[in-house]
Image (cartoon, rainbow, N blue to C red):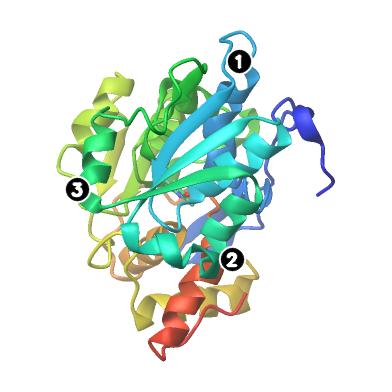
Amino acid sequence: MPNIGKNFFKRKIISRNEIPIHINGHKITIKREDEIDKWVSGNKYRKLKYIFLNLNKNRINKLLSFGGAYSNHLVALAKAGNLYDLKTIGIIRGKEWEKKYLFNPSLSFCKKNNMDLYFVSREEYRLYQKGITSKKIINSNSKLKIIGEGGKCKEAIKGCKEILTASDKDFDTLCVSVGTGSTISGVIESSNSNQFVLGFLSLKHKKMKKEISKNTSRVNWKLIDDYIFKGYARVNEELINFINDFYKEYKIPLDPIYNSKMVFGIFDMIKKNKWRWGKNILVINSGGLQGVEGMNLKLEERGCETIIF
Ligand SMILES: *Cc1c(COP(=O)(O)O)cnc(C)c1O
């Protein structure tokens, strides 16, 4: 994609829907939000959009956020910050990355895009997230905005209301993967009342239902936590095989942290006759493909099968 600098978030983006996949009388259509950009990918584009469009109005010249060593959100923030000539700061969970971040594709991308990286222990990270931020990192004169882990904020929900378009109203069931819950909140808010939204959790989070209820008064949605695969960012051979088979069959890449688990779950429920929702299903592919390179390095280290795209 050409460097379009400060017009990056001014574009109105409508992602294309793939030709439907038919299984057991169900029609599954995948919305290719992953095609927005490799780095400011899928829902991360949607979540950052209104932060960047309001930088001048809010007199912000620095953005700080948090994430793990493979964070899709930090990668997106770093690239967007670079396009807008804006200072970005990433607080990275895991002190151990300090000495080897150049061997991590996501972190080295952040660095190349001029993000300042601070590596903190897991305990420190928790304190940072509670708002206890170090003066060493934050210069009190600068007009800094702190964005929650994973890009969680009000602007994020507003941006995610733009994923669905008028032509998507014919689908009866909408599927979204869930991390912080911002994306699904936007999708629920912009759905029609005759549509049902299913959220697939990528990590155990007992309060997620409550969190999402704070963002919407709508009730046409439900969370599914049967396809977490033992934890956030955990994968097994079955999932990697599913990703590779799916790619060979449909030429659609699914990331290993979020979308592959969701699509695995949808197929699994339909095949086992456990699917209780509509037959005309829209699945939002929320991107995250930048993480594949890092995941493959980990899989290679363990001597496992890797992802083929
Ligand atoms: C961050 C992310 C999610 C989770 O989105 P939330 O708004 O945090 O729920 C889902 N899919 C991908 C690919 C992501 O990077």
Q: Say which residue appears at 52% left-offset and 18% top-offset.
A: 142
Secondary structure beneath disc 2?
A: loop
Left or right: 79 in relation to 129: right
- Quick one: label 2 or label 1, which is nearer the N terminus? 1
Q: Amino acid at mark 2?
A: Pro
Secondary structure beneath disc 3?
A: helix
**Residue marked by disc 1:** 54
**Residue marked by disc 3:** 123
Q: Say which residue appears at 51% left-offset and 29% top-offset.
A: 63
Q: Amino acid at mark 3?
A: Glu
> Residue 36 appears in which quarter of the rendering?
top right
Residue 6, percent from left and from top: 76, 28
As drawn, the residue found furthest toward the bottom would be 303
- Quick one: label 3 or label 2, which is nearer the N terminus? 3
Distance from disc 3 to disc 2, alpha carbons, whole Å, reads 35 Å
Q: Nearer the viewer, mark 1 or mark 3?
A: 3
For the question of whether residue 103 can be seen, the reply is yes
* Contact check, label 3 and label 2, Cβ < 8 Å: no
Disc 2 crowd rating (10 Å Cα; few below 14, some 14-19, many 20+) is many
In the rendered view, tell whether residue 305 sits above or below residue 243: below
Q: In the depicted view, which residue is nearer to us: 275 or 108?
A: 108
Which label belongs to residue 253? 2
As drawn, the residue found furthest toward the front would be 136
Left or right: 252 in relation to 288: right
Disc 3 crowd rating (10 Å Cα; few below 14, some 14-19, many 20+) is few
Distance from disc 2 to disc 1, alpha carbons, whole Å, reads 33 Å
As drawn, the residue found furthest toward the right would be 2
* Contact check, label 2 and label 1, Cβ < 8 Å: no
Residue 44, percent from left and from top: 54, 41
